[in-house]
Amino acid sequence: RNIRQAFSRQKALEKIKKMEKPALGSKKVKLKFTPKISSGRDVLSVRDLAVSFDGYQLFKNVNISVYRGEKIGIIGPNGIGKSTLLKIIANIKTDYEGEISFGHQVHTGYFDQEQTNLDSENTVIDEIWDEAPALNYYEIRRILAQFLFYGDDMYKIVEELSGGEKGRLSLLKLMTSNANFLLLDEPTNHLDIDSKEVLEDSLINYEGTVLVVSHDRYFLNKVVNKIYDLSEDGVFEYLGNYDYYLEKKAELEETNDEVTINKTKTQINAEKKKERELIRDRQQREKNIRELEEKILMHENEIHELETKLCQPSTYADTFLIMNLNEKLNIRKEELQELYTLWEEFIDN
Ligand SMILES: Nc1ncnc2c1ncn2[C@@H]1O[C@H](COP(=O)(O)OP(=O)(O)O)[C@@H](O)[C@H]1O
Ligand SMILES: [Mg+2]
């Protein structure tokens, strides 16, 4: 299968279509998630936190300030204590030294791979409706659709869901709960691309506060605007996303070098840095294209499946099913067009 040929055919078709159809603002309207209860401006203050296990000190001097609406990433090497830190803030672990205080009306919501906030015997729709009983059926359906639960999906039992579905539902449940301060531990691990994207988009559109442990630099780049780098001696704060963190870190290293090493070395370092950046940019671009192509294929496959289903005689009699399939199909087709456009932009650059 030659994906590029397929795309140029598609490109030609697109041009024709564009001439036929006036461009309507087809960008999807993403739902904003506003917590039911708003917290005060100060959300969390951690002062001189230190944690030990069996006499071995994990970290000390950890100082963190979180303000309403911030999206913060916590990074650091494996085993340094990121999960432990999150559990302490979530009040799951209580054995520590130091001071932790929350601001006015702060309600935490904790999320990890175990998805312990889900009731395995409940249906998808009830999991969310129980959290947000004030919403009507159509609002619930719209929210569920935004989290990729279409049609009959919403009557599935939690136990039967895939990992990605559970991840999506778990986050949606948190966002519709009373929580206004989300503590997320590696939320994108093991998620399929679609689920990951939903997670990213909904967190971007979430108006509460988020503290998230993640290794996923693409996720961090999209979602967070502040990074805490955890080490044995405390946290270092970077006021930006992951790319900013890398940039700043390289700069700091360079400044340190300049003090001790002569200019020639500095120049060499600068060149090396530039080279690293070029390589990084190229790798990033290639990865973006690969990810897009993968997404496009998944969309094309799904559209094909939906069209096949629509053509089955057994579908004819079921108006509700036809409506559902069509709704799904339209969403997927619209998304596919956006993906094609993005892909073209990347290829042309
Ligand atoms: N209950 C516990 N008892 C003893 N050691 C633990 C306990 N929980 C975690 N640890 C240890 O603490 C360290 C940090 O764990 P963790 O917080 O999961 O790190 P991270 O999330 O940064 O990878 C690990 O070495 C782990 O083995
Ligand atoms: Mg961890």
Image (spheres, helix red, strand yellow):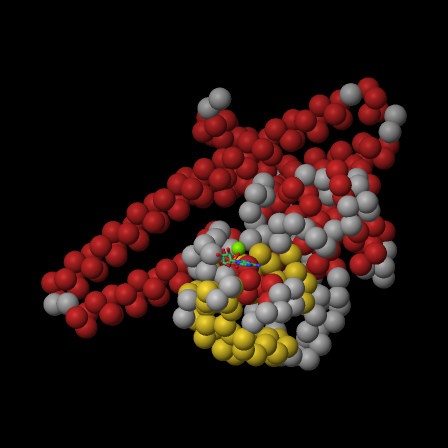
Q: Residue at x 83, y 56 (%)?
A: 130
Residue 260 visible in rendering: yes
Q: Quadrant of the C terminus?
A: top left
In the rendered structure, the answer to whether residue 111 lies left or right of residue 240 reads right
Q: Is residue 8 above or below residue 119?
A: above
Where in the figure is residue 139, as x and y percent of width and height?
80, 54
Horizontal side of residue 161 vs 349, given as left or right: right
Can residue 142 be spotted in the picture?
A: no
Q: Position of residue 109 (x, y in %)?
A: 68, 63
Is residue 186 rendered to the left or right of residue 105? left
| 244 versus 283 height, above or below | below
The image quarter in which residue 77 lies = bottom left
205 and 92: which is toward the camera: 92
How far across and how far down the image is residue 295, in percent?
55, 37
Q: Is residue 61 left or right of residue 168?
A: left
In the image, 13 versus 32, the foreground residue is 32
Determine the residue positioned at 76% across, 43% down.
Answer: 158
Q: Residue at left 51%, top 61%?
A: 82
In the foreground, 161 or 56: 56
Residue extending farthest to the front is 54
Q: Residue at x 78, y 50 (%)?
A: 119
